[in-house]
Image (cartoon, grey):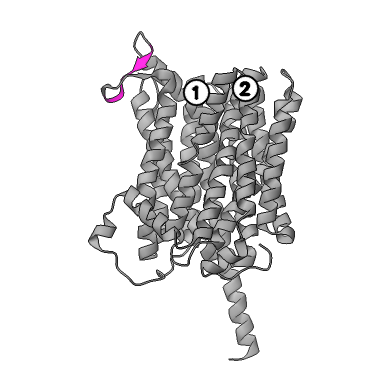
Amino acid sequence: MGIDTVRTADFDETAERRREQRGWYFYDWACSVYSTSVLTVFLGPYLTSVAKNAADADGYVHPLGIPVRAGSFFAYSVSLSVIVAVLVMPLVGAAADRSGRKKPLLGAAAYVGAAATACMFFLGGDRYLLGGVLLIVANAAQSVSMMLYNSYLPQIAPPEERDAVSSRGWAFGYAAGALVLVVNLVLYLAHDSFGVSESMAVRICLASAGLWWGGFTLVPLLRLRDRPAATAREATAQEATAPGLRRLAATVRDMRRHPLTLAFLLAYLIYNDGIQTVISQASVYGSEELGLAQSTLIGAVLLVQVLAVAGALGMGRLARTYGAKRTILGSLVAWTLTLGAGFFLPAGAPVGFFLLASAIGLVLGGSQALSRSLFSHLVPPGKEAEYFSAYEMSDRGMSWLGPLLFGVTYQLTGSYRDAILSLVAFFVIGFLLLARVPVRQAIGDAGNPVPEKI
């Protein structure tokens, strides 16, 4: 084979890989709008108001005959969606690895979630139970689809490209979330000018997120490709039909053969619990402790989305120089300092809160993007979807200790300042555990090539 032929083949392979990577970015662009506009901003307050419309004189609704306070219905629905995702993800992950056919499974999960989100347009009046079902389906479907999406990373990017590719994916997602949230807020805040009621404006915002999700999912489905399974072993009937928790237990048992991978996952579980708790409780801290208006809090959410784009790309570049592990450790120090600053933030100071939101945005995207890319190096070949199901569950399904500590600290002290400061423990412990993981050895033990910078 001549030199020109080899160069042409290399060029074609690189071009195909770049094309696939660009398609991969667009799934984050597609589904992140659900996380931002639906789950973070609009659905919680709206579904709670719908539940209150259906409540009895004591303020309870009765799904399946179970008395539930209307104000708790949204939180319970989110929790139930996590349980459903925990049961389904290991099954889908194992099936994807056995068959090598991730793309149809990704498409199925994406369009189930997008359809459920689009149907939220019909949540008028007192249809709280419909809202709960649609939320459970959409949230679980997004978790499954993100697990499959993440598992593509080690297949579409060689080791030296993964930090940059993962960071661009997160940046795409935050950019889409910010763009659609701006449009939604214009409709919501000026709904009278558009001739629609506030309720109708919210329902349009919810449904548009589903249409966006479904429409842009076509791009990755057209560009991503399936790869043959790493092994030709067929699953036994018992393995194929094993319940989700049993599949998860089997994955964890397999991880025990890679203790350093498990050690990283433990560190990630702890510091990510802190990240997720800060995200979920920041608005409570802003409204209850600092006395800030709802418009200020929504503006802060939008600021976080915009700056997370720059943060993800910027930390991706830092990782090229210092390696992903050191960059993540640096971000955990930044999280700790940010929480310390938040503790001293004076009440009624929107400028200070916006500065706090800016700091969160700059480290948020990078922390998540580089954690994903670093974990991708620690996954044994052929087990990407199965291992990323455990990763996704630690991302979504295991983040309960942070809110519990936040709530208990507030209950004992009566201070949201003490509650927000208590979350420093997650970043300190996560830092110490991650610092102890010899990632080069972990990558080699997983059977993967070790990048020059890691």
Residue 408 inside the magenta-drawn segment = no
Q: Which image quarter is the C terminus in?
A: bottom right
Residue 295 versus residue 368: which sits nearer the camera?
Answer: 368
User: Gap between marks 1 and 2, in whole Å?
Assistant: 21 Å
Classify mark 2: helix, strand or loop: helix
Amino acid under label 1?
Answer: Pro
Look at discs 1 and 2 and give the one toward the viewer.
Answer: 2
Return the residue at label 1: 45
Q: Which image quarter is the N terminus in?
A: bottom right
Residue 124 drawn above or below residue 377 = above
Label 2 neighbourhood size at 10 Å, few (<14), some (14-19), many (20+)?
many
The residue under the point 57% across, 74% down is 13
Return the residue at label 2: 416
Residue 450 versus residue 177: which sits nearer the camera?
Answer: 450
Based on the displayed image, in which of its 4 quarters is residue 36 positioned?
Answer: top right
Residue 140, given in percent of the width and then of the height, sits at 40, 42
Classify mark 1: helix, strand or loop: helix
Residue 90, given in percent of the width and then of the height, sits at 38, 52
